[in-house]
Amino acid sequence: MAITIPSGCYRQPTESKGVDASGNSRFNYVLKGPYSSLDSLADSISQGDEIIAGWYASSQDLQRGNGDTGTLTISCVPAPNDGAQQNPQPTPLKDIWSIRSVRNDVSVMAYCDVSPGANPLLALVEAWMKEPDGELADELKFRAPDGTIREITEGPTVALINKLRKGVESVIRFYPVVTRTRTYAVPPPKCLENLGYIDTPDASGIQDLTKKPNGITTAIAAHEWLKIQDDAVEGTDGKWQRIESWMGIKKTDNNGGHPWDPDLYGPNRWTMPYFQGGGGGGAA
């Protein structure tokens, strides 16, 4: 809603409209009148307030004139809505995408699964690791709770144990991280959105390839993503940045399933502590 001009104050013909050095549209709204009235008005205006239709406060300057007069200049930026007429959203001044890789050391136990014969079995690996008799362990054997000696012969389990015998405890993996940085003249409309949940970054709306890294759309499609950052930061120049990041795991890394476990990161992820009841947990 536009501001109300105080009694005795008037808009001035020195108002100006243009584009700054960064290519951002600007409009300077100028009022002149009693200094005290303009001072009260300036105190009531916050960054992002609508000054006139389509223009929102970015900064302001109040100067004292002759007598008890003053001139208030409010620097404004455009903020058209996003299609929701009752919920105007500021348009970013810049929208920058980037992609990088991050290192993640994964325990070799991640190779284990529950299919005998096809995967290393965690129960057998741990039983072998807990065997106190070095001679038995060296022969890939362990003593079962009933006292019998069991030899591990399953191929995948033996293969994993041989890695452990060589001192290999983890493997290095590199995951892509996609980051979107939007710069605003006013505080961004959201932050902390879907943080910690499976969430797909949407770079499809940027048609200009100079505005996003080549191949980023293909990379997004090939991975499942976990949102790991959504910050709102004000800079020393008064502009705001919303910084969002997503970490991806290749969909093929889990035989076409969910690389990010929906029970831990999905929309109905388990609560902490875990509660099994009807719908299977909820957002924590």
Image (cartoon, rainbow, N blue to C red):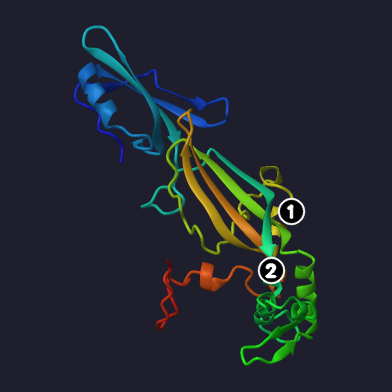
Residue 134 percent across, percent down from the top left? 74, 75
Kind of residue at badge 1: Gly
Q: Which of 234 and 205 is in front in this view?
A: 234
**Point 65% across, 46% down: residue:** 98
Q: Which residue is drawn at 57% across and 29% down?
A: 22
Q: Mark 1 points at which residue?
A: 215
Task: Give the vertical position of 130 relative to 59 (above or below).
Answer: below
Figure quadrant of the N terminus: top left
- Give the x, y percent position of residue 263: 52, 73
Q: Do the residues labelled 1 and 2 touch (CB within 8 Å)?
A: no
Please identify the quadrant where the C terminus is shown.
bottom left
* Residue 260 visible within the image: yes
Is residue 88 rendered to the left or right of residue 140?
Answer: left
Residue 257, compared with residue 115, is above or below; it is above
Q: Is residue 188 left or right of residue 218?
A: left
User: Is disc 1 surrounded by few (<14), some (14 to 19) or many (20+) residues within 10 Å?
Assistant: few
C-alpha span from label 1 to label 2 = 17 Å
Q: Height in image: 222 above or below 43?
A: below
Outermost residue on the left side: it is: 7
Q: Earlier in the sequence, mark 1 or mark 2?
A: 1
Name the one closer to the observer, 118 or 136.
136
Q: Where is residue 113 in the image (x, y as percent from the top left)?
A: 67, 79
Which residue position holds label 2?
251
Name the residue at 62% across, 72% down: 258
Tell me if residue 192 comes above or below residue 186 in the rendering: below
Q: Which x, y percent locates residue 117? A: 76, 86
Q: In which quarter of the image is residue 44?
A: top left
| Residue 74 appears in the picture as rendered | no
